[in-house]
Structures are given as structure tokens and as C-alpha cells.
Image (spheres, helix red, strand yellow):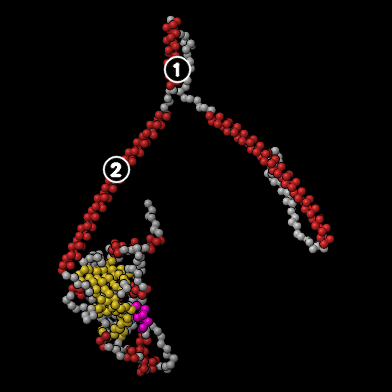
Amino acid sequence: MARKRRGRCVKKNKQLTSVEPEHLTRAPHSFIFHRGTVGKYVSSLVKDFRKIVEPFTASNLKARRKNSLKDFVSVSGLLHVSHMMVFTCSPESPYLRLVRLPRGPTLTFKIHDYVLARDVASSLKKQYSHPRLYQTAPLLIMNGFSGESSQLKLMVASFQSMFPVLNISKINLNNVHRCLLLNYNSNTNTIDVRHYMIRVTPVGVSKSVKKLLSSKVPNLSRFSDIADFVEKADALSESEGEDDPNSHVELPQDIRSRGNIVGNTSAIRLTELGPRLTLQLIKVETGLMDGEVLYHEYIHKTEEEKAEILRRREETKKLKLKRKQQQMENVKKKEAIKEEHKKKSLEGMKKKKDDKVEIVKEKSEPQISPDVEDENVNEDDDAEWYRKEVGKEPEPELFQHKPKSALKRKSDSLHNNWRTKKIKKEVKSVKWSDQQDEKWRNKKVKWNDQQDGRKRARSTNFKNNKSNRKGNFKTGGKNKRKQTIIQPRRKRKQGSRVTKDGRRY
């Protein structure tokens, strides 16, 4: 048997042919979207935040209004999604909810201030870009998260679990292009979020030498010798003249950029990419946005109130479980009734089929009519009477009659019906012709009357016009009046239709 050929779409579909490696499936993935009505700036902030956690996020995710949180949770296991970040907007300020899938907890942050990535880029004097900038996850740098409070420890654990774990002994520095800085301010209980691009430049190299090392060819038309270009004193700019020694590091690996070799000293420089955020933790709750409140910044409850809330929650859980069991029982009852109805309908269909077969059999068997049976009885009676009266056996031809056949002869009803229809049709045609003749006679009489009336009107009009002409001639046309002249109607042309008598109408 020949092999089945695969189509073009199947060949190009990488999901069918290749399987993701284990380190990618274990990496934390995320859904970032907004719920409810938000402005265009919050929508832009959602897109900028997706860039921070790339590549392990759905960058082109489109969440519709009819999509509920259950839809995202049901898909999260298949797509290895571990976190969900939901942006909402209230009349006071926007909020960010960080949810750990599939069972929580949920952290709610209030966004005090935010600056979009496009505004940050427009404020820079020189903007940098890298083709592989968003192909790897950023480094997470956390500062000031030192404390014994449970909510602080939960925040640290939640932020760390959002990004893949780094192995320092196996890390490749060529794959490190970005870093995310989280700075906690203990006085205001706020978190400053900043997003930077990492660049490595060699130290102790003048600007002219950097230009030679780069792929761009410098303009040497003003110099007679290349030494003048390299040794000129004013080659350094003010920003690059002074360098912080704390940013100098000795490279343990080769980096793809020019001049960065193992063992050489290089400077690490950061360029902000944006966005900027100022967050404050408001609430911590168990479950997916509907569990028990563990911490709240503004609302504090007593132990009695907490016990009452817990009791209500248990009651709602029991009621929900009871309703679910009742629904299952109702579904089972409906299925049993449906099966019983199905059996009854099948039995009825079978019975109906058997009755049809019996009716067909009865029709196919010939039936003896009662008239034939009565004749046979009468013949036997006549022969018996003859024996008693005459005392002899009757001759065989005396009471012998041909028995009528059981099958009746077809009546001539069809023939008679056809004949009556034909007669009716002929009578109808005769009546129609008489009606047409009578109509034609009436039309002719009416037309003759109209013609006579038109002739009389024409003669009277002519006489009136003649007398008016004489009067106008005598008076000089002073008493001249317009007379209405009745124009004779034209004769109607005879039509192309012909009656049975040969007349046109």
C-alpha cells in the first residue's frame, strides 16, 4: 500500500512535527490582558507590559468581553501558563491583579503612576535596538525587599516565579539583553518598576577607535593621516569622557559585540526601554479572585468577623455542592426517561411494520365473495327439492351454472368519467360561444348608438358655429366667444382576435 501524501499545510505546521524541549515547557508562561472598560492608555500599558515578560507570554492575545476567567483557566494547563496578569480600571485609578494558576493566590496592586514605553523612548537622546532583544527573558533585580512580613515574602515569591530560573554556571552572556528592576520603598510601601536594555562596551578605547571597530567607515576627508584621526584630543564627548568605575567588569566569556574579549575590562551601560510603574499592594486573597482575604491595606477585621465570613463561605460551598448533586440526579432521571421512551418508540415501530406485512399478505390472498357461496347453497337446495318432489335424480345440466369469479370485473367508471368530462367540456364551449355572440351584439348596438349621437352633435356644432360667424361679421368681432367644439372620437381599429364565427374583436 502506497504512503499517504501530506499536504503543504501539514508539512509547514511545526506543532505537528516538532515537540517543545523540556526547559521551555517548564518555564513560567503568562496571560496579560485587561477586563472591563479601560482607556487607550491602559490598553497601551498592557501591550508594553507584555514586552517585559516576553518571550514566555501570549503577545497577540485578544480577550473579548464574552470570555470569562474560566476560559483562560481551562486553556492554561494545555499552554503551560502559570501566571495571569489582569489590568482593570476604576474611577479612582487603574489596578493590576497578579494571579497564580491554577489555585491562586491573587495579589491586587494599585497603579499610582505609569509612563508608557513610547514616552520613555521619546525622552532619550539616542535610542538603541537589538534584533534579539526580546528573544530571551530578562534578568530580575529586586532591591529593598527585606522584611519579616508575610505579604512581603509572598510578593518576592510571586515576582520570582514569573521568570525562568537562571543557572549561573551555565548561563550564556550573549543571551542576556534586558533586566527588570523592582525597588521596594518601605516608607511608602510602593514598588518602582523599571525596564532596561543591557549594553557592554570596552573600556579605555577612544571614540575614534570605537568608530574604527564598528562596521561604519568614518569620514577621513579632513585628515591627512589616520594617526591624526586616532590621536586627536577632542574626540571624546562629555557623556563618554567620564565613566563610573563601579560599572567596570572583567568579562568571563566572549561577547558578540566588537572589542569585548575574555579577560578584557568592559563597562556595563543601561538604556531604559519602559514602561515605568509605581505599584502598591492592596489585597492578598486565596483562590482565583474569590477566596478568603489574607491581607488588606485599608480594611482590618476582628476575629469574630473573620469567623462569620468563614462560616458563610462554608455554607455557600455546601449549598453549591448540594445543588450540583441535585443536578446530577436530575440528569440521570432524564436519561432514564429518554431510554424508556426510546424503547417504547422502537417497539411501536416494529409493531407497525408487522401490521403492514399482515395487511399486504391479506391483500395478496384471493377472497371468495358471499354471493358465490349463496349460489352454491341455493343450487344444493334446488337439487334436493327436485329429488323429493319427482323422486328422481336431477340431470346434471339442469341446475348447473357457471360460478361467478371471485375477482370482480373493473367497472367502467373511468371510461364513464372521461365521457362525462368530454360532454361537459362541449356544453361549456357552446355556452361560451353564445355568451360571446351576445356580448358582440350588445357592443355593436352600443357603438351604433354612440355614432348616431356623435353625428347629431356634429350637425348642431356646425349650425352654432355658422350663426356665430354671421354675428361676428356684423358686430366686428366684439361679441366673439369661444365655443367648445366636441371632437368626434376615432373609430377603434379591429383587433386581431377572431371568434369561432370568424368575427374580429
Residue 3, compared with residue 61, is above or below; it is above
Q: Which element type, helix, strand or loop, lies under badge 1?
A: helix
Q: In front: 241, or 91?
A: 91
Q: Amino acid at mark 1?
A: Glu
Q: Amino acid at mark 2?
A: Glu
Residue 375: assigned label: 1
Q: In front: 171, or 504?
A: 504
Q: CA distance from mark 2 to mark 1?
A: 56 Å
* Residue 434 position within the rendered picture, expressed as x and y whole percent measured from the top left: 66, 37
- Residue extending furthest right? 474
Q: Which element type, helix, strand or loop, lies under badge 2?
A: helix
Query: Tag 1: Cα neighbours inside 10 Å, few (<14), some, or many (≥20)?
Result: some
At horizontal 37% and vertical 63% (from top left) the residue drawn is: 13
* Residue 459 position within the rendered picture, expressed as x and y whole percent measured from the top left: 79, 50
Q: How many marks?
A: 2
> Residue under circle 2?
340
- Residue extending furthest top? 391
* Residue 128 position within the rendered picture, expressed as x and y whole percent measured from the top left: 36, 81
The span picked out in magenta is 116-124
Q: Is residue 472 left or right of residue 28?
A: right
